[in-house]
Image (tube, grey):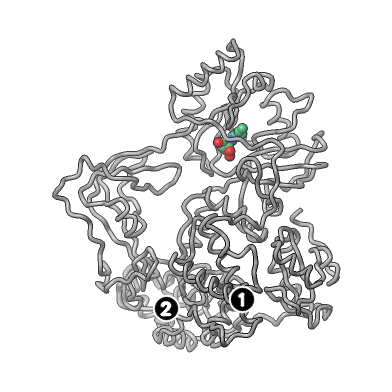
């Protein structure tokens, strides 16, 4: 699949397009790997693509680009954001896990000040990423990440999507000021995101902090807005004549309209600090977000000056970090769960043990690599940890307690549910059971996915009913649903007449569900809700999608090679063709009934437009749509045929240079809107 573009068959523009596409995809994979910690392709696939790009670049030095992923070592991934040097470096805090060390810290303060007349302000230590916000005339003009402490990335548009920052400044705020704080994601939003990824068969994110940090670095602020982030501010940089303590600065910031945590306490001695710490160590599980400790800061600015800084951190503050609670318990056995897509997840069954107030009996082991890494053996005593996270993890084995006779663990070779031999694609971490037609959890999982609220939304039917119908031999696949009769359903255990009627009516109503949701319901690997929408918009009928080539698929915005391959594989399977034929016969919608695009003007008729960078008023997709409904065509790379470049913030320097060289008009977002006669959209500002 990867080598279909042979040099001798390709025109120069095809080669350039292919190079651009490979560069774009590889940068995205780098980003997913380094920033999101959630790679979407295997290392092997990545290396193959990189090799292909290297080969093409070597043969065509005329397309040299200093930003090419072939010229990057690993994670130089934040190139697309402008840098900004912090006026005052963003320092970190000294930290400790120990009560004794915290008392030592307090003693040093007393010694240096020469008295005990001081106060600490205790705050929660939010587990997110720090940000510096610059305000001018009450407006947020710049948001900069911590970066390496002395300079960070300018991520203003992305930060502006945070709802908590939408208020305009109030009261007598300074003309210019800088505040710092922490951006984070609430656990519920994180869980929702992971649930969505699970539905799409995507690997799950590790924790809210990783997602928050990855989200801030997304290129399209519209995508950021879809992932709700929140913020607490905890530091005012500007000193005014009236503000002389940290507590006052927090009050002032609050009065100006900035979001300040309400869980802050002024303490006049270290015992009061311990009370605060102990309270929050217990209470943190009831917060809607993760904290990993408590920060104590000297309240008085004068005293702070006296105490000063070390090279890395202030001497007037320290973080006390909560211990992640750990326990040692015995590994009794390993169970293997089979998911809807056939992926196998090993789960450790443990001798029950109490951790952070709850009994832990099981821990996820992710995949075979994890078992190998830990060299786990049944009967071993293992360390189990639970931080802020809900799912406990095994962090190691107590080798001293290992019985020498324990044999190494052999990973299963066959599906525990249907005994089919498992497969593991090259470079993938997970094993799969390929028997999608009759492996029970896969069959049931697929039907449950199909009837799900976001797919066919079948009224009167829930996961248990699917299980029951399957166990009774009445349901083997999604197409069977449409053969179910009222009389048959009624025979089920505990099925009342009304429920049976509701269920049958619910199934009948499925004919009204639009094509894009049917497509999502089919459960094609990697085709989640958003991808299904994109596919339905581009390929108006299922026949068009069934016969779409790899190139046609990857030409669709946001459809990468991995998704394209999965779609092709799905439709090549005769079993799926038969299922779709039956669903069609049952009257389901396999055609996009949405009206054709309503054209707004022909201002851009015959014009080729390239969109680049991050926009503040509209998303990239919205701008692309505007190009089309005004008669223009969207193109990905700048060539001599490009008529306009619409440049957002942080447009890549190579693209910019090329546009200038070729003398192509470069329009800002507002200039573009003006050109097509569209009013500006200020809702995000
Ligand atoms: S004060 C001079 N307050 O913890 C230090 N930091 O290692 C200014 N953090 O980089 C930071 N909650 O990202 C402060 N209430 C809080 C905090 C907090 C979380 C983070 C912050 C900082 C790191 C310190």
Residue 462: % across, % down: 43, 67
Label 2: which residue? 478
Q: Does residue 306 show up?
A: yes
Front position among marks 1 and 2: 1
Residue 39: % across, % down: 48, 61
Residue 496: % across, % down: 38, 70
**Image marks 1 and 2: residues in contact by CB distance under 8 Å:** no
Label 1: which residue? 60
Vertical arrangement, residue 598 with respect to residue 530, above or below: below
- The residue located at (30%, 55%) in the rendering is 371
Q: Residues within 10 Å of mark 2 (few under 14, many from 20)?
A: many
**Closer to the camera, 41 or 510?**
41
- Left or right position of 19 against 665: left
- The residue located at (61%, 50%) in the rendering is 229
Q: Does residue 456 show up?
A: no
Q: Residue 5 appears in which quarter of the rendering?
A: bottom right
Q: Residues within 10 Å of mark 1 (few under 14, many from 20)?
A: some
Which secondary structure lies at badge 1? loop
């Amino acid at each position: 699949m990867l080598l279909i573009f042979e040099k001798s068959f390709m025109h120069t523009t095809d080669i350039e397009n292919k190079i651009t596409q490979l560069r774009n995809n590889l940068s995205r994979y780098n980003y997913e790997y380094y920033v999101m910690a959630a790679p979407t392709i295997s290392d092997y696939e990545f290396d193959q693509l990189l090799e292909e790009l290297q080969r093409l670049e070597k043969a065509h030095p005329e397309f040299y680009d200093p930003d090419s992923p072939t010229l990057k070592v690993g994670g130089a991934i934040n190139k697309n954001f402008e840098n900004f040097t912090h006026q005052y470096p963003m320092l970190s805090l000294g930290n400790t896990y120990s009560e004794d060390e915290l008392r030592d810290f307090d003693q040093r303060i007393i010694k240096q000040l020469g008295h005990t007349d001081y106060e600490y302000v205790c705050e929660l230590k939010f587990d997110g990423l720090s940000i510096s916000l610059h305000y001018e005339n009450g407006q947020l003009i710049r948001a900069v990440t911590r970066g390496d402490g002395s300079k960070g990335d300018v991520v203003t548009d992305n930060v502006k999507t945070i709802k908590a920052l939408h208020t305009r400044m109030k009261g007598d705020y300074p003309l210019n000021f800088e505040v710092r704080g922490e951006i984070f994601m609430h656990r519920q939003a994180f869980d929702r995101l992971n649930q969505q990824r699970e539905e799409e068969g995507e690997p799950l994110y590790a924790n809210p902090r990783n997602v928050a940090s990855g989200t801030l670095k997304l290129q399209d602020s519209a995508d950021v807005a879809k992932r709700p982030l929140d913020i607490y501010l905890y530091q005012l940089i500007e000193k005014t004549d009236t503000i002389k303590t940290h507590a006052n600065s927090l009050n002032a910031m609050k009065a100006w309209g900035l979001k300040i945590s309400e869980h802050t306490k002024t303490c006049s001695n270290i015992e009061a600090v311990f009370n605060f710490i102990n309270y929050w160590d217990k209470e943190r599980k009831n917060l809607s977000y993760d904290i990993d400790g408590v920060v104590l800061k000297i309240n008085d600015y004068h005293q702070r000056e006296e105490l000063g800084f070390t090279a890395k951190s202030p001497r007037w503050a320290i973080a006390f970090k909560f211990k992640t609670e750990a326990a040692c318990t015995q590994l009794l056995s390993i169970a293997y769960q089979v998911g809807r897509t056939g992926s196998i997840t090993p789960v450790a069954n443990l001798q029950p043990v109490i951790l952070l107030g709850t009994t832990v009996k099981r821990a996820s082991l992710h995949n075979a690599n994890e078992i190998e890494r830990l060299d786990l053996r049944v009967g071993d005593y293992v360390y189990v940890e639970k931080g802020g996270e809900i799912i406990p993890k095994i962090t190691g084995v107590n080798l001293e307690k290992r019985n020498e006779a324990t044999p190494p663990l052999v990973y299963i070779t066959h599906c525990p549910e249907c005994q089919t031999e498992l497969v593991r694609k090259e470079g993938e971490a997970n094993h799969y059971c390929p028997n999608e037609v009759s492996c029970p959890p896969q069959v049931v999982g697929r039907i449950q996915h199909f009837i799900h609220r976001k797919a066919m939304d079948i009224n009167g039917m829930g996961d248990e009913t699917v299980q029951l119908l399957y166990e009774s031999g009445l349901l083997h696949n999604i197409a069977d649903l449409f053969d179910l009769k009222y009389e048959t359903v009624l025979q089920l255990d505990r099925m009342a007449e009304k429920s049976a009627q509701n269920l049958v009516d619910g199934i009948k109503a499925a004919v009204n569900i639009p094509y894009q949701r049917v497509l999502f319901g089919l459960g094609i690997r990697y085709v989640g809700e958003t991808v299904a929408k994109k596919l339905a918009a581009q390929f108006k009928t299922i026949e068009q999608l069934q016969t779409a080539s790899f190139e046609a698929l990857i030409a669709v915005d946001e459809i990468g090679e991995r998704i394209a391959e999965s779609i092709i594989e799905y439709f090549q399977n005769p079993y799926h063709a038969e299922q779709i034929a039956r669903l069609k016969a049952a009257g389901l919608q396999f055609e996009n009934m949405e009206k054709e695009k309503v054209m707004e003007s022909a201002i851009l008729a015959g014009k080729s437009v390239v969109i680049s960078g991050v926009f503040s008023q509209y998303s990239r997709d919205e701008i692309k749509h505007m190009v089309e409904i005004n008669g223009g065509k969207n193109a990905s790379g700048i060539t001599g045929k490009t008529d306009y470049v619409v440049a957002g913030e942080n447009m890549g320097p190579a693209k910019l240079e090329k546009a200038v060289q070729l003398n192509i008009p470069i329009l800002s977002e507002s200039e573009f809107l003006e050109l097509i006669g569209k009013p500006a959209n200020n809702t995000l500002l």
